[in-house]
Each structure stands twice: as structure tokens, then as C-alpha cells.
Amino acid sequence: MFSSRMPRASRRVFTLGLAAAVAAMAGFAGLAQAQQAGAPIKLLVGFPAGAGTDAIARTLAEKLKDQLGAPVVVENRAGAGGQIAAQALKAAAPDGHTLFLSHDHSISILPQVVKNAGFNPATDFVPVAGFATFANVLAVSGGTPAKSLDEYLKWVRTQRGGKDTIGVPAPASIPEFLVKMIGTKYKIDVQAAPYRGSAPMTADMLGNQISAGIASVPDFIENHRAGKVRIVATIGNKRQALLPQVPTFTELGFANLEDLPYYGVFAPVGTPQPVIDRFGDALAKVLAMPDVKQKLTTMGLTVAYEPQGQFAGRVRSYTQTWEGIIKASGFTPQ
């Protein structure tokens, strides 16, 4: 295969390079073989059908199937804030047939607030690509007269004796930590009411069972447009394009709420790099389609493709930011 005169070090480099090339070819061949057999690619989602993340996943899956030449099936593994879906990804074979579409909670937050999450994103997952950021927001229900955060605070103090309950989509989530920050800053007794996802929380807001809730823009935007709930504050370092009249928490005097939550796709560790690159390239092409970008933007996302390396850096930075906030809050992992 190589000359006996070739130095030993050079032979080793040549051998390693050949092995890498063979592995890459195997990755492409494996994916192509699966496509020829019609094997679907599962896109795990950690929330129920009909929720914001599910709608996003189905929008992308519909277009990805044409780019990849194979069916892309959204599989809802709802429960525990995405923990069940994350555990399913860890257990999946690293062959590119099972991926996880997730936002920040399952990847950056859960492992910090749960003693035994059953997965470690740093060692069990590989970031594939990022595709959007979004903002968590505080919204008040239609039965609440407030049209701003100041009016909501005044209403709580004068009509509720300085006490209120704010819904959050999951326990020990960023929305729950935001509730604590609101209570501390404004010296009111507000308690988080954790739900199993944003859908049941929003239903209770629409029924005026709770007066306020914190979730993502995609969770609230349609009801906000319809006047059924009113978004009064958002995280981020600038106002949301869909909500130009709504101030940021930073404008209102909160610190460390500039980094936006993210959406991205993850694969089991060990997934061949060519398979990851192929899916990432397909996702980039889908996001460039005007109808897809418009639909996701309408849902409240800021669409921007991030390749693997850039997205991995975002995940690390965001995780570190919230690690500091969570520790400073005195929260004890459950």
C-alpha cells in the first residue's frame, strides 16, 4: 500500500488519513442506503403535538424530506420539559436516523436543575446546527386590565394584596427563574405555577384561571395578536421585531437577560460527521426558502442558520450565563 522507504511517522499519518476517508465514505454510504430503503429520519420533539416547538419541527420536516430524499417524521416524546426526548436521543443509534429538535431548556437548563437528568449534552450529544433564536416574554391574561408591566404590578399590589401566581411551562425553567427575579426586584409575592408545557398554561390564561404567564414568543404571539393575552416584557438586548412596542427586561432594569434562547438540532454522539454535515446543509437550504422563513418569523422566531461550530459556541455561552444565574438564585437541583 505504501513504500517501505516511507518514514514510519509518515506511514502512520497516511494510515490515519485513509481510515478517516473510509469512515467518511461509510457515513455517506450508510445514509444513502437508508434513503434507498425508504427508512425515515426521526425528528424527536420533547413537547406535545400542537405546541410551538412541534409546529416549528413540522414546518421544517415537510421541506427537509425533499432535500434529504427520505421521509422526515416528527416524533413527539413529550414530558419533563424535553427530558424524555433527550433520553431517547441518547439511547438512539448514532446513524443519522434519529435527531432531536430542541430549544435551550432541554440542553442548557435541565442538566443544571435536575440531579439525574439521564443525559449529559456535553458527552452524549453532538450539535448539528442552529436555526433560530427567540425571546421569553411575560404576558398577562385578557381578564387582567394591565397593558404594561407597571400596570400589572400596580394591579397585583392594589387588587391582589401584593400576591399573584404566574404560570410557567415547566418547573425549574428560565420562566420560573424570571418569576423569582420579578418578585425580588419589585418586592411582590409572586409564585411560579409550573405546567406540563405552554399549551395547558395558555389555556388557563385564556380561561382567566391565572392572571399571567411566562413563555416564548411562539407560544403567545397568535393570542397576543388576537388580544386574548397581552405581552408586556421580553428578554433580549433589543425589542422584538414582532413586538416593537414591548420593552425588554433590560430596559426595565434587569441584568443578565440579554442572551436569547436558541433552537437547534442535535444528534447522538458518534454520529458520522458526513451525516451531520449533510443534514446541516439540508437545513440551511430549507431556511433559505422564503415561505419557510416567513412562516417561522410569523411564529415569533428570528431565523438565522448557524453551522455546527458556531452553534456549539452559542450553546456553551448560553449555558454558562444561566449557570451563574441559577447558582446565584440559590436553587438546589431536584
Image (cartoon, rainbow, N blue to C red):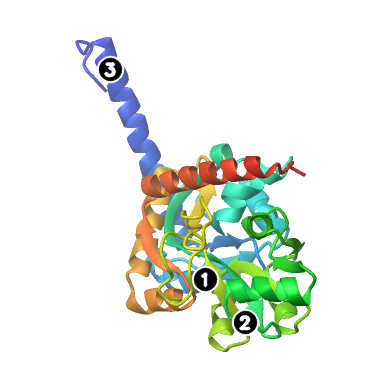
Residue 190 in which image quadrant: bottom right
Out of 294 and 188, give the one closest to the viewer. 188
Q: Which of marks 3 and 1 is in front?
A: 1
Q: What crowding class fits label 1: few (fewer than 14 Cα within 10 Å), some (14-19), or many (20 or more)?
A: many
Q: For mark 2, does the 10 Å Cα neighbourhood hold few (<14), some (14 to 19), or many (20 or more) residues? A: many
Q: Is mark 1 on a helix, strand or loop?
A: helix
Q: Can residue 49 be seen in this view?
A: no
Q: Residue 11 carries which label?
A: 3
Residue 79 rendering spot, x and y as whole percentages: 72, 60
In front of the other: label 2 or label 3? 2
The CA distance from mark 2 to mark 1 is 21 Å
Residue at image position (51%, 40%) is 270
Looking at the image, can residue 86 be seen?
A: yes
Give the mark nearer the N terminus: 2 vs 1. Answer: 1
Given the current orientation, which residue lies at the most extreme front position?
Answer: 158
Q: How many labels does the image show?
A: 3
Residue 56: mark in rendering: 1
**Within-10-Å neighbours for mark 3: few <14, some 14–19, many 20+:** some
Asked where in the image residue 199 lies, by quadrant, the reply is: bottom right
Q: Nearer the viewer, residue 21 or 119?
A: 119
Residue at 53% x, 62% y is: 39
Q: Earlier in the sequence, mark 2 or mark 3?
A: 3
The image's mark for residue 229 is: 2
Q: Which amino acid does label 2 sit on?
A: Val
